[in-house]
Structures are given as structure tokens and as C-alpha cells.
Image: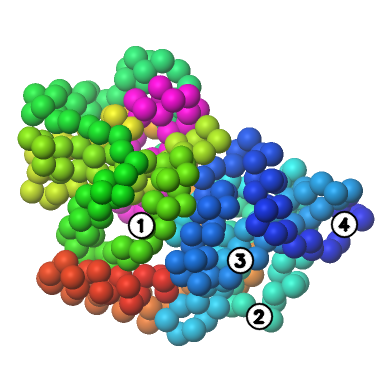
Amino acid sequence: MLQKQREISWLTVDQWQTFAESRENSSIFHHRNWIELLHEQYGFEIRIPALVDEGKVRAAIPLLQTRNLRGVKKLVSLPFTDYLQILADDLPTLEVLCQLIQNQFRDRFAAIVVRSNEPVPGADYESHNVRHELPTDVPLTEIESSFASAIKRNLKKARRQELEFHKRDDAAALDIFYKLHVLTRRKLGVPVQSRTFFKGIYDKLIKTGLGYVGIVSRRSVPISAGVMLGCNGRFVYKYAASDPASLEYRPNDWLVYNTIRIASEEGYRIFDFGISEKKQEGLRRFKSKWGATESDVFYSYVLGQPDQNEEQSAVMRVASEVIKRSPTAVCRFIGKALYKYSQ
């Protein structure tokens, strides 16, 4: 096949979805609804190059066209996405496809970046992030036995505080999450996604059965919430937020525990805690204490080199300090103005 097939085939979103569904390692981030959400919210053009042999797709990569604050264009698989498992028959097939992609777009884009669980053969790569995964295709008691003693103590405290957990799929639940999300982002000094982005998550993912909102309350007051996404046996803890004034009650531990419980009860094979920056040592320790295994996430540069855009980094650093010192409305405004350019 590698000797005969030397041209790119371009998949429609329908064709991509059929291919992704045929692969056991696909996740919610391969799903057309996630890709279309990014396209609709940020205007990123969708391109899906593939190698096809005798009518069968052997490898394919969904790419979205982005640009930074200076207007420099990139193709990214995928922006605002933790990482994608590689969907290819084997690594040599993937390498051929990436060579063809490079030849196709060499003069049109500054970089082509594939964010994945393993490096792309023949491409330069870097790894500044890690992922954490916990098997959930075993009894819940077995999962709980892997929790660190600190986690078990925090869960006991959450129970003493009579924290409540609710799994919800209504629009009001997403509103609750978003208010906590803005508070969390402001505390961290990070621009927040627009409210319309989360409306898109509700319409395309939660309403279609691909996710839910988990809410932890104390005395009927929501103090922690998360957006959870699930597909093809893999459950992703995608977004989480909490009231900074209520952390002493361990609401985040209660949120994680109950989402792990639901993943186990509903037959998911893997609970994916999402990615963390390697420098976020505290967050990495927190995820590992649940018994999760840590692995690298790779950014492979099929074209171009790792982005050293100091100008854009300086803008984001200034924005971070402004956000921390300003009302939440400023966090939302900066997010609306800058967020789409951060990839």
C-alpha cells in the first residue's frame, strides 16, 4: 500500500466520523461534534487528509486552521484539545501521510502540529504536558483500593460535610458550571472561554448524550462543578471549576470521586483526567493520588519548529496579571478577545 498510495485523499466530516468509529482507540475528541464545535465557535477551517487504499482509510488526521495574534497561520490537530490518539494502521503509514501533508502545505503554513499520545515518525517534537489515565473496567472497590491515603481522608471529610453530587444534563447546570469556571480562571489569571463556547458544548455534546455536568453542592449551594465527556469507552474529565472560598470542604475530591464512580458504573474502560503542564507538579500529584498512570503528551511538528513567539507570550503574561486584579467581567472580555489566538 505504501508504494502505491502516494496521494492525499480528503475526507468529508461524514467519512471521518465513519473512520473514527471503526477505531477502538478513538475518543470524544475524534468525534465530529467536537471538531464541528471548534469550527463553528472559532471559524477554524476543517481539513482532513487521509491515506486510502482500495476504498479503506488507512490513516487520517483532522486538522484545523488557526492563526496567532500576528496573523501567522498553522494547522493544528486539534486546537483546544488535550491530545488525539493516532488513528493509523501503523507508524510507517502515518509517516507517509505526514510527508504528503508537509509537501502539500509547505508554502502555505508556518507550522503543522499534531498533538498526540506518541511522536509522529520523522517529525521534530516536544513534550511539555502529561496525561493521566485510570482503568475503570474493574469493580469500584478495586478502583478505590488504589487511592492514596490522602485522597481517602479527603473523601471522608467531604462526607462529613454532607456534600451532595448531582449528574445533570440541563442548560441550567451548565450555567452553574460557567459561573464557577469564571471564578476559577480569574484566580489563576487565565482568559476564560466565551459563554457561547459552552453553549455549543451543551448543544453538540451534552444534549446528544456525549457528556454531562457534575455539580457538588453544600447546603444546596453549588461549590464545584465539571463538564465530563464520554465516547467509545473513554471518559474525559474535561473542565472543572470550584468556588475558591469553599476548597476546605474538599469539593474537588468529591467531584472526581463521583465521576470515577459513574464511569465505572456506566462501563467506561478508561477515566482520562486530561492533560497537565509538566511544571504543574501539584496538579500532577493530585491526579496520581487517584491511582492514575502518567504519560507524556507529544506535540509533533510535521512542518515548522516549536513556537518561540515571545511577543505572544508577553501579551498573555500581561493579560494574566490584569485578570487576577480585575473583576470577572475583565476575564471574560480578555478571553473573548484573545482566546482563539492562543493555539
Cα distance between the residues tagged 3 and 4? 23 Å
Mark 1 is on which residue type? Phe
Mark closer to the chain start, 2 or 3: 3
Q: Which residue is mark 3?
A: 46
Relative horizontal placement of residue 80, taking residue 224 as reference (left or right): right
Residue at numbered disc 1 = 198
Pick whichever, 69 or 130, lies toward us. Answer: 69
User: Which residue is the site of mark 4?
Assistant: 5
Mark 4: few, some, or many residues within 10 Å (few <14, many ≥20)? some
Kind of element beneath mark 4: loop
The residue under the point 39% across, 32% down is 292
Q: Is residue 2 found left or right of 111 in the rendered image? A: right
User: N-terminal of the two: label 3 or label 4?
Assistant: 4
In the rendered image, residue 202 lying in the magenta stretch gets the answer no
Circles 4 and 1: CB atoms closer than 8 Å: no
Q: Position of residue 77 (x, y in %)?
A: 57, 60
Measure the alpha-carbon separation of dots 4 and 1.
41 Å
Q: Residues within 10 Å of mark 3 (few under 14, many from 20)?
A: some
State the CA–CA distance, disc 1 to disc 3.
20 Å
**Of the two numbered discs 2 and 3 in the rendering, the one whose residue sits closer to the viewer:** 3
